[in-house]
């Protein structure tokens, strides 16, 4: 298994509070991604990174920010959590472009009350 | 923008039988990649099989094979000799060659395997 961990694995928070999710990899892969999974929607890309301090938006980036100060860590921040951000969040990594697969972390279940 | 459609929200199959999961996609690109991912109840996303659009030969991985019809923009997954451990959500995904690295996922098909 690819070395990807996510923390926390579960979190319950209240509307309006800031939340940061962490993705940590030990594979030294260049690309890192944040997806959210919601029933009836599959997985949708929030943000991704193609190198340290290099990030770009995905299709559902509103309300989220990311940072990558080290190759191994990719942080996802909800500045002011809303109930619509209740979801399961997955981090993924990949080394090169093309048909190489993305390896996924175990997911974080976030509930915003 | 590319879209991926899985028209079967749920499917069931008897153990040892064969089942086919459907996936269609919409794109104006000629070169791309297609994937099937499996998500068991543990939530871990696991790559099942991949296909490069420029390859005419259908990909196979043990009991898993695809029927890739490029002109029809269809990418179905066939699972032969179904096993109880195959029960999971299956997601079809599209990825452009070059440019954005994002995977575009379908909404998934829940596969139940009956003993």
Image (spheres, rainbow, N blue to C red):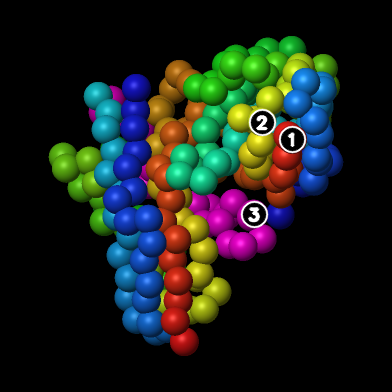
Residue B114: give x, y in percent of width and height. Answer: 44, 81
Residue A48: give x, y in percent of width and height. Answer: 62, 23
Q: Which residue is mark 3?
A: B44
Q: Which residue is mark 1?
A: A113
Q: Decide: is A68 above or below B92.
A: above
Q: Which residue is mark 2?
A: A83
The alpha-carbon separation of the residues under discs 1 and 2 comes to 6 Å
Between residue B24 and residue A13, name the one nearer to us: A13
Q: Residues within 10 Å of mark 1 (few under 14, many from 20)?
A: some
Which segment did they paint magenta?
B29-51
Residue drawn at x 55%, y 74% is: B85
Under tag 3, what secondary structure?
loop
Residue B46: give x, y in percent of width and height. Answer: 57, 54
Residue drawn at x 29%, y 50% is: B7
The alpha-carbon separation of the residues under discs 3 and 1 comes to 25 Å
Under tag 1, what secondary structure?
loop
Q: Decide: is A98 above or below A48.
A: below
The alpha-carbon separation of the residues under discs 3 and 2 comes to 24 Å
Magenta stretch contains residue B44: yes
| A57 lies left or right of B8 | right
Q: What secondary structure prevails in the magenta region?
A: strand
* Residue A2 visible in the picture: no
Q: Decide: is A49 above or below A110.
A: above
Q: Are marks 1 and 2 in contact (CB under 8 Å)?
A: yes
Q: Residues within 10 Å of mark 2 (few under 14, many from 20)?
A: some
* Residue B72 visible in the picture: yes
Q: The disc numbered 3 marks a residue on which chain?
A: B
Quarter of the figure with residue B58: bottom left
Give the label, 3 or 2, closer to the camera.
Answer: 2
Q: Residue furthest left?
A: B71
Q: The disc numbered 2 marks a residue on which chain?
A: A
């Amino acid at each position: 298994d690819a070395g990807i961990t996510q923390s926390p694995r579960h979190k319950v928070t209240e509307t309006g509070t800031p939340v940061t999710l962490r993705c940590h990899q030990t594979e030294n892969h260049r690309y890192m991604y944040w997806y959210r999974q919601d029933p009836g929607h599959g997985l949708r890309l929030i943000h991704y990174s193609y190198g340290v301090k290099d990030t770009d938006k995905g299709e559902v980036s509103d309300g989220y920010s990311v940072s990558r100060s080290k190759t191994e860590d990719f942080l996802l921040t909800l500045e002011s959590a809303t109930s619509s951000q209740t979801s399961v969040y997955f981090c993924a990594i990949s080394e090169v472009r093309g048909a190489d697969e993305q390896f996924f972390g175990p997911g974080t279940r976030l509930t915003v009350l | 923008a590319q879209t991926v459609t899985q028209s079967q929200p749920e499917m069931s199959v008897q153990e040892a039988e064969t089942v086919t999961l459907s996936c269609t996609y919409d794109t104006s690109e000629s070169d791309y990649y297609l994937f099937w991912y499996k998500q068991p109840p543990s939530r871990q996303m696991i790559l099942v099989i991949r296909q490069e659009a420029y390859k005419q030969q259908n990909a196979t991985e043990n009991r898993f094979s695809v029927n890739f019809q490029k002109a029809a923009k269809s990418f179905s997954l066939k699972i032969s000799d179904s096993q109880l451990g195959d029960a999971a959500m299956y997601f079809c995904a599209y990825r452009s060659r070059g440019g954005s690295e994002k995977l575009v996922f379908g909404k998934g098909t829940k596969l139940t395997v009956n003993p």
